[in-house]
Amino acid sequence: MRMLLIGPPGAGKGTQAVRVADRYGIPAISTGDIFRANVTQGTPLGLQAKDYMDRGAYVPDDLTNALVLDRLAQSDAGAGFLLDGFPRTLAQVYTLDECLEASDGGLDVVVQLVAEQDEVVQRLLKRARDQGRSDDTEDVIRRRLEVYQEQTHPLVAVYAERGVLVSVDAIGEVGHVTERIFSALGGRVQRADAE
Ligand code: ADP
């Protein structure tokens, strides 16, 4: 089972990705987390990614694509995965398509987390106070939302056209949103423990 969670910064992708991946017994692969781990460890990739991230810009596709292809080739992703934060550009969609065609087909389901701009800005400002993430300052948050609208939101239509999109309201308690995702997925994919 191959899934993608898509939505603006602050919609709760990371939080929900862990819960959904756990339920379906697949790894959650978050490009943001992988980049942040590389920044913390001071790897060459981290050094390259940090400037982009701190400005609220996307890390260039060539770096990001290489990172994800490498991660998807690991054995735990063989039976499926949940992507969080990739693809974020059309070029990344095509890279993922090529990679998945080599196995047997594309994503099974794309879950869009829907949240209004005002709500996500409030959440990100709160996260800034709680966690001090270096890209959660107000200016950078606004930039990230603009970049999302320009470069990533159009992907929702691409996946809708392919018939794999489900949209879920991301406003409300974390557990409620998780339940909405499970019921949206219910008819489309089999749970690991039901097989
Ligand atoms: P959020 O969605 O809350 O902004 P993420 O943790 O998903 O945060 O990503 C943080 C940053 O990591 C992004 O602003 C971007 O710089 C970089 N990044 C993550 N995924 C990608 C991607 N697929 N392509 C390019 N850059 C990415």
Image: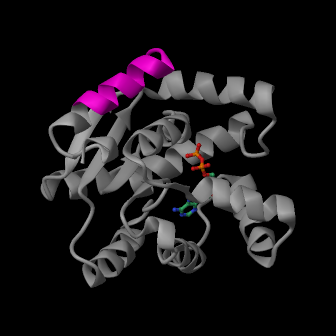
The quadrant of the picture showing ligand 1 is bottom right
* Residue 179 is inside the magenta segment: yes
Q: Residue at x 58, y 59 (%)?
A: 31
> Quick check: 20 left or right of 14?
left
User: What secondary structure predominates along the stretch shown in magenta?
Assistant: helix
The reply, left or right, for residue 128 in relation to residue 72 is right
Looking at the picture, does residue 39 appear above or below residue 65?
Answer: above
Provide the residue span drawn in magenta.
171-183
How far across and down, in percent of the image, does residue 30 sit?
56, 54
How far across and how far down the image is residue 61, in percent? 52, 74
Q: Is residue 192 above or below residue 39?
A: above
Image position, residue 112 (x, y; %):
33, 41
Q: Residue at x 82, y 73 (%)?
A: 43
Residue 170 visible, this angle: no
* Foreground residue among 82 and 63: 82
The question of residue 48 being in magenta is answered with no
In this view, the residue in front, 118 or 73, is: 73
Q: Is residue 88 above or below residue 140?
A: below
Residue 187 appearing in the image: yes
- Which residue is at a point 31% across and 54% down the rendered structure image? 154
The N terminus sits in image quarter? bottom left
Which of the two residues, 7 or 186, is positioned nearer the viewer here? Answer: 186
